[in-house]
Image: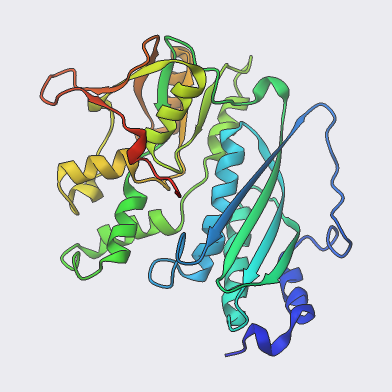
C-alpha cells in the first residue's frame, strides 16, 4: 500500500484537489461571494485519532463523513445555510493514501446533502492523525437561532431519537459482549454512530414559515441533557422535561436495561439532533411535518431547576446533571 511518506506533500495536494472546488483552490485563500443582507456563521470541529475515532470504531470514510456532519449540524443549529468548508489534516507519515482518499470521499458524500464544497485547507505532519473542519454558513439576522433566548412557556422539541449513536459505539467497542444482538439491530445502531444525519431539513422547514418564528436551540452533539442544560443556563431559565415524552428506541431496548438506556439517551451524545424551544403553534407544526420521531418533551419554566419528571409518579423527579455530560477535560 502506498503511504504518505512515499509520495510527499505536493502529490498529496494533487490528490486532495480532486475533492475540492477547483474554481476556489490554488491560491493562498479562497474568495467567496458574500450576501450583504446576511450574517456569516463560522464553526470549527476537530477530530483526533484515539479521542474521537479509532480503527476499531470508525472506518476512514465514516471519519470524513462524521467530521463534515458535525460541522453541518452546528450550522443548522444556528439556523444557517452552509456555503463553504475548509479541511485541515494532521497526518502520520506512514498513513496510507487510500485512508486519506476515503476520508475525503466521506466528506464529499456528506456535503452532497447541501451542495456545499471544500474550498481550501491545510496539511501538516503529526504523531497522530487528526482532521479539523471549518464550516461557513449564512443566515438572515432575524433567523439566527441562539442559545440564550428561551422564554418561560416555550415548548422544548427534539427533532429525533437519542441514544442510538452511543449504543452503536458500545457495540463497536465491546463486540464480544454484544454477540447475541441480532444483525439488523447491530447495523442500525452502528450506522447511527458512524453516519449521523445533520438536520438541515429542519432549517428549511423553519424558513418556510411566514413570519419566521422565534426559536432558541442548539444541537445535541454532547447529549440531550447537555443541550437542555446549556440552553437553560444561557437563557437564565429552568425546564420541566416529561419523561413519558422521551422515547427509548426499540433498538436500545434490545441491547441494554432501562437504567443504561436512559443514561445513553440523556448523556450519550453524538446523535446530532436539534433541541429547539418555541411557541406551541410552531412546535406542533414541526412535530407534524417531521414525523413520529420528533417529540415535544417539555417546557421552559421560570424556576432555575432543570428537572425530568414522571406525570404518572412511577419514577422520582430527577435533576439533570451537567457533570455527567461529555466533557473533554
On the picture, is 268 further left or further right than 329?
left
On the picture, is 158 further left or further right than 71?
left
User: Which quadrant is the N terminus positioned in?
Assistant: bottom right
Determine the residue positioned at 25% across, 68% down. 175
Residue 231: percent from the left, percent from the top? Answer: 47, 25
Tell which residue pokes out farthest to the front in this image: 329
Count all numbered tags in the image, as a single digit.
Answer: 0
Residue 158 visible in the picture: no
Determine the residue positioned at 29% across, 22% down. 307
Residue 285: percent from the left, percent from the top? Answer: 46, 21
Q: Is residue 149 above or below residue 53?
A: above
Residue 198: percent from the left, percent from the top? Answer: 52, 45
Residue 234: percent from the left, percent from the top? Answer: 51, 23
Q: Is residue 63 above or below residue 117?
A: below
Q: Is residue 166 above or below residue 122?
A: above
Image quadrant assignment for residue 122 = bottom right
Q: Is residue 208 above or below residue 45?
A: above
Nearer the observer, 65 or 218: 218
Colouring scheme, one of rainbow, by chain, secondary structure, one colour? rainbow
Residue 211 visible in the picture: yes
Tell which residue pokes out farthest to the left in this image: 314
On the picture, is 222 further left or further right than 22?
left
Amino acid at each position: 500500500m502506498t503511504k504518505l511518506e512515499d509520495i510527499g506533500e505536493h502529490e498529496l495536494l494533487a490528490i486532495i484537489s480532486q475533492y475540492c472546488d477547483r474554481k476556489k483552490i490554488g491560491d493562498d485563500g479562497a474568495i467567496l461571494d458574500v450576501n450583504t443582507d446576511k450574517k456569516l456563521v463560522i464553526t470549527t470541529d476537530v477530530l483526533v485519532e484515539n479521542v474521537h475515532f479509532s480503527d476499531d470504531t470508525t472506518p476512514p470514510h465514516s471519519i470524513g463523513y462524521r467530521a463534515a456532519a458535525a460541522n453541518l449540524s452546528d450550522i443548522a443549529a444556528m439556523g444557517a445555510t452552509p456555503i463553504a468548508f475548509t479541511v485541515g489534516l494532521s497526518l502520520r507519515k506512514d498513513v496510507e493514501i487510500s485512508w486519506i482518499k476515503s476520508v475525503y470521499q466521506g466528506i464529499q458524500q456528506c456535503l452532497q446533502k447541501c451542495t456545499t464544497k471544500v474550498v481550501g485547507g491545510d496539511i501538516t505532519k503529526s504523531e497522530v492523525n487528526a482532521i479539523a473542519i471549518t464550516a461557513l454558513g449564512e443566515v438572515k439576522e432575524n433567523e439566527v437561532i441562539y442559545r440564550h433566548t428561551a422564554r418561560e412557556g416555550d415548548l422544548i422539541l427534539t427533532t429525533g431519537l437519542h441514544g442510538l449513536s452511543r449504543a452503536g459505539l458500545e457495540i463497536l467497542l465491546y463486540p464480544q459482549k454484544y454477540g447475541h444482538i441480532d444483525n439488523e439491530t447491530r447495523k442500525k445502531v452502528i450506522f447511527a454512530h458512524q453516519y449521523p444525519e445533520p438536520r438541515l431539513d429542519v432549517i428549511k422547514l423553519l424558513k418556510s414559515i411566514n413570519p419566521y418564528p422565534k426559536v432558541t436551540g442548539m444541537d445535541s452533539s454532547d447529549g440531550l441533557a447537555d443541550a437542555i442544560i446549556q440552553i437553560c443556563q444561557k437563557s437564565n431559565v429552568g425546564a420541566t422535561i416529561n419523561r413519558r415524552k422521551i422515547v427509548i428506541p426499540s433498538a436500545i431496548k434490545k441491547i441494554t436495561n432501562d437504567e443504561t438506556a436512559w443514561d445513553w439517551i440523556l448523556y450519550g451524545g453524538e446523535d446530532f439532533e436539534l433541541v429547539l424551544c418555541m411557541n406551541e403553534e410552531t412546535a406542533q407544526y414541526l412535530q407534524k411535518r417531521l414525523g413520529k420521531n420528533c417529540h415535544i418533551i417539555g417546557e421552559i419554566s421560570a424556576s432555575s431547576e432543570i428537572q425530568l419528571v414522571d406525570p404518572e409518579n412511577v419514577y422520582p423527579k430527577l435533576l439533570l446533571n451537567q457533570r455527567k455530560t461529555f466533557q473533554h477535560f
